[in-house]
Image (cartoon, grey):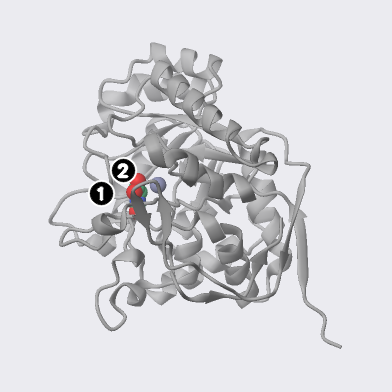
């Protein structure tokens, strides 16, 4: 008799997510709320969520959409963030804390999708960053330098030296999450930081950066659905990320960076950056952990270290996955929009049961 392998863990949270807005919001949210208890919602809308007032309005739209979702999605909690700009006022920080905003997001201007309003010079933000440290609001960092002359594949490693470390030296109380890390340099930096003298640091890791290296973007032709920012890197970097995620370090936790774009905007002469992984997010992570025989570490990575870092209670519900294969749909229809998920049409070894 054959028996299937099942894995039951505390319900995970997604500490880095793009939910978008408007007509697609409910559909995008439906996928994440089926699997996750909470998610940190990125503020890179058009226009970006730069004030507490805008964040609360966005949160209200999300909560309204949740009401229309199935029963088991009703307890989903969106955790809101603000988009840091050159003009963010220090006075907004106390208001943000009071309103339950959990963090501010730093997009260096021009680094990625909807980042035009991002920070041009961090020195302009010193007062705000001090206020964040004072109110214990972490800074979530898109860690790439933006100069056109710098090789795309080097932008994260150079950001560490030129921007991130100096920033933390100037604001030694500030807590930082290095988002969607993609390189061994980022893993080493997060691992070796001495938090006796500098603020706490953690990093999120996506499922796609654990499963794929940069060859996936060019397999037999250009594959726009594997294009995201920071871009996938060499195999040695993927292995460093997998090693970090499956290690005992509390500093690495789950953040999908699931980022849907319409099919026609991905399959375009200037295709958008972003991989849509929300529908099979937990299965993708299970696949990655299973590939190195480390499924026993999945719960800590997916469900414990994130809430511990943010000072929130761990979820009490449980979810179960089964090692049976599923085929990823070729597209999802969200209103008028067609969205292609990561690895569309291919199979996955794990299936989420609920
Ligand atoms: O690939 C990405 N997509 N990286 C980001 O930083 C933004 C995101 C998006 O919003 O589409
Ligand atoms: Zn993102």
Q: Which residue is at the front of the view, 328 or 234?
A: 328
The answer to whether one can see residue 75 in this image is yes
**Tags 1 and 2 touching, CB below 8 Å:** yes
The residue to which callout 1 is attached is: 145
Image quadrant in which you'd find residue 219: bottom left
Taking the image as shown, residue 342 lies to the left or right of residue 254, namely left
Q: Secondary structure at mark 1?
A: loop
Taking the image as shown, residue 136 lies to the left or right of residue 52, namely right
The residue lying furthest to the front in this view is: 336
Mark 1 packing: few (<14 Cα in 10 Å), some, or many (20+)? many
In the rendered image, the vertical position of residue 300 relative to residue 25, given as above or below: below
The residue to which callout 2 is attached is: 163
The residue lying furthest to the right in this view is: 1
Which residue does the image show at 78% across and 77% down from the upper left?
A: 4
Mark positioned earlier in the residue sequence (1 or 2) = 1
Cα gap from disc 1 to disc 2, whole angstroms = 8 Å
Taking the image as shown, residue 79 lies to the left or right of residue 21, namely right
Mark 2 packing: few (<14 Cα in 10 Å), some, or many (20+)? some
CB at disc 2 and ligand 1 closer than 8 Å = no
Task: Give residue 24's mark.
Answer: none
Which residue does the image show at 37% across and 21% down from the upper left?
A: 128
List x then y, in percent, for residue 66.
57, 34
């Amino acid at each position: 008799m054959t028996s299937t392998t099942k894995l039951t863990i505390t319900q995970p949270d997604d500490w880095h997510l793009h939910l978008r807005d408007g007509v697609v919001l409910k559909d995008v949210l439906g996928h994440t709320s089926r699997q996750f208890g909470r998610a940190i919602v990125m503020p890179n809308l058009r226009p970006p969520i730069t004030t507490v007032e805008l964040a609360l309005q966005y949160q209200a739209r999300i909560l309204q959409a949740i009401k229309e979702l199935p029963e088991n999605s009703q307890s989903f909690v969106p955790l809101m963030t603000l988009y840091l700009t050159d003009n963010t006022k220090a006075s907004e920080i106390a208001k943000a804390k009071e309103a339950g905003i959990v963090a501010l997001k730093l997009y260096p201007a021009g680094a990625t999708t909807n980042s035009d309003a991002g920070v041009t010079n961090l020195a302009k933000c010193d007062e705000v960053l001090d206020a964040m440290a004072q109110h214990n609001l972490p800074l979530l960092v898109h860690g790439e330098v933006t100069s056109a002359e710098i090789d795309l594949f080097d932008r994260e490693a150079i950001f560490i030296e030129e921007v991130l470390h100096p920033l933390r030296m100037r604001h030694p109380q500030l807590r930082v999450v290095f988002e969607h890390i993609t390189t061994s340099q980022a893993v080493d930096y997060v691992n070796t930081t001495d938090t006796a003298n500098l603020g706490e640091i953690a990093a999120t890791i996506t499922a796609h950066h654990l499963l794929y290296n940069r060859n996936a973007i060019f397999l037999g032709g250009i594959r726009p659905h594997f294009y995201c920012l920071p871009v996938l890197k060499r195999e040695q970097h993927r292995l460093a990320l997998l090693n970090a995620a499956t290690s005992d370090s509390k500093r690495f936790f789950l953040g999908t960076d699931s980022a849907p774009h319409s099919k026609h905007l991905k399959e375009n002469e200037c295709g958008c950056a972003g991989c849509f992984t929300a529908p099979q997010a937990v299965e993708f992570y299970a696949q990655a952990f299973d590939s190195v025989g480390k499924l026993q570490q999945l719960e800590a990575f997916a469900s414990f270290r994130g809430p511990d870092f943010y000072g929130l209670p761990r979820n009490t519900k449980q979810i179960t996955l089964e090692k049976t294969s599923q085929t990823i749909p070729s597209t999802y229809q969200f209103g008028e929009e067609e969205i292609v998920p990561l690895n569309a049409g291919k199979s996955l070894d794990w299936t989420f049961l609920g």
